Image (tube, rainbow, N blue to C red):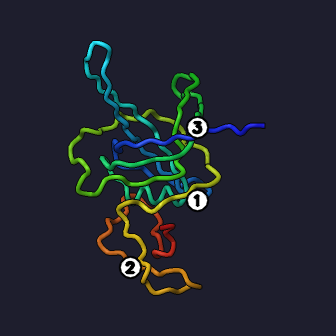
Amino acid sequence: MAKDLNKVMLTGHLGADPEMRYTPQGSAVTTFRVASGRTWKSADGTQHDDTEWFSVVSWDKLAEICNQYLTKGTRVYIEGRLQTRSWDDKTSGEKRYKTEVIAQDMIILSSRGDRPAGSEFEAPAPDEEPAPPPMASTTARRPATAPAPSAAAPRDNGGAPSRPAATGRPAPRNLPQAIEGDEDLPF
């Protein structure tokens, strides 16, 4: 029997700062919107610009990383899967649907200096909806702006390279729980 595939890879810019919450079970969930643009020419030679907005949901450690490092205008690569969920609208009683990208990997593509300061990537107001259901697992890569561990770094904990304390990091925006040390970070 053949396996099915549900995989999304996209690049784009964040329309607003990410929003992080915690589920009652204590899992971190961060949501944000990504604008992915394309330019194409019609048969008559007219150039067209098109922007597609994607709702992205990240969970657990990846959610904490996205909340800490991503800001409005940041260019990112997101890899994950599509998930459609439904709920009953409280005001009208109608069935509502939303398709989201459940992020399994995120790479920051822009440096801090490359992020736009204007409202070019302003996201439209999101609809009201319930929190997404938990996801089983996530993985995260080191963001492109984070320093790589040095090969000549002193080793501890059975041969794993230790990292010096990072300086100059921005304070987390809405992170209720602080990360206790660099050893808690997956990169």
From the viewer's perspective, tell me whether residue 133 is left or right of residue 173.
right
Residue that appears at 60% across and 38% down: 6
N-terminal of the two: label 1 or label 3?
1
Locate residue 79 relative to residue 147 in the image: left or right: right
> Dot 2: within a 10 Å radius of its alpha carbon, few (fewer than 14), some, or many (20 or more) residues?
few
Mark 1 → mark 3, Cα distance in angstroms:
22 Å
Which element is circle 2 on?
loop
**Dot 3: what SS?**
strand
- Locate residue 145, reporting x and y percent: 35, 62
Label 2 or label 3, whichever comes before in sequence order? 3
* Residue occupying the point 62% across, 49% down: 135
Q: Nearer the viewer, mark 2 or mark 1?
A: 2
Q: Is residue 179 above or below residue 54?
A: below
Q: Amino acid at mark 1?
A: Gly
Q: Position of residue 61 (x, y in %)?
A: 52, 61
Report the Cα–Cα distance between label 2 and label 1.
27 Å
**Label annotation for residue 165:** 2
- Pick the front one: 15 or 39: 39
Name the residue tied to disc 3: 83
Determine contact: label 1, label 3, CB under 8 Å.
Answer: no
- The label nearer to you, 1 versus 3, is 3
Identified by mark 2, the residue type is Ala
Question: For the residue labelled by badge 1, is the local secondary structure a helix, a strand or a loop?
Answer: loop
**Which label sits on residue 26?**
1
Verify CB contact (< 8 Å) between mark 2 and mark 3: no
How crowded is the residue under tag 1: few (<14 C-alpha within 10 Å), some, or many (20+)?
few
Image disc number at residue 55: none
Q: Nearer the viewer, residue 60 or 96?
A: 60
Name the image quarter holding the N terminus. Answer: top right
